Amino acid sequence: MKLAPDQQKAIWPIIGFRTQGDFGPYTTYRSHRGPTIFFLSTSPKRPFTRRQLARQNVMRLAARAWHGLTPPQRAAWCTACRGAQACITGPALFFYYFSRRDTAPVVTLAAHAGVTLFFPPPCP
């Protein structure tokens, strides 16, 4: 059964989904007044800059590196965040490290949590 766009907008909060970001043909966000706002997604008016493309590539490489970790290695990154009671997730901490190669805060969190993390080698 295909729902009309207005019906689609109304059904997500009812079934318990909190959508945010791009979701199908819509971009959604949660208003500070409470309701979820839906609007049709649009494409950028200008092409991406070289700096944006470079940043996207770093994130793409970080995602590949994250998925290349073994499950115990991924679990260690998540445990480092939980054990240190940091307000960051394991994947977000990994992406931070991967994009900046700043080991000091990552090593500190891991030490507080009592875990050893695997640091992937730099990409070419």
Image: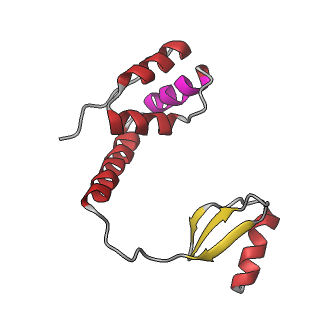
Q: Residue at x 42, y 36 (%)?
A: 96
Q: Residue furthest left?
A: 124
Q: Residue at x 34, y 74 (%)?
A: 46
Query: Magenta segment: does it hold 57?
Result: no
Camera-side residue: 49 or 20?
49
Residue 74 rendering spot, x and y as whole percentages: 47, 33
Residue 53 rendering spot, x and y as whole percentages: 29, 59
- Please state if 73 lies on the left or on the right of 6 as rendered: left
Query: Magenta segment: does it hold 78?
Result: yes
Colouring of the image = secondary structure
Q: Residue at x 31, y 72 (%)?
A: 47
Q: Principal SS element in the magenta part?
A: helix
Q: Which residues are magenta?
A: 71-82
Residue 64 rendering spot, x and y as whole percentages: 35, 46
Q: Residue at x 36, y 23 (%)?
A: 103
Quadrant location of the C terminus in the rendered image? top left
Quadrant location of the N terminus in the rendered image? bottom right
Q: Is residue 2 visible?
A: no
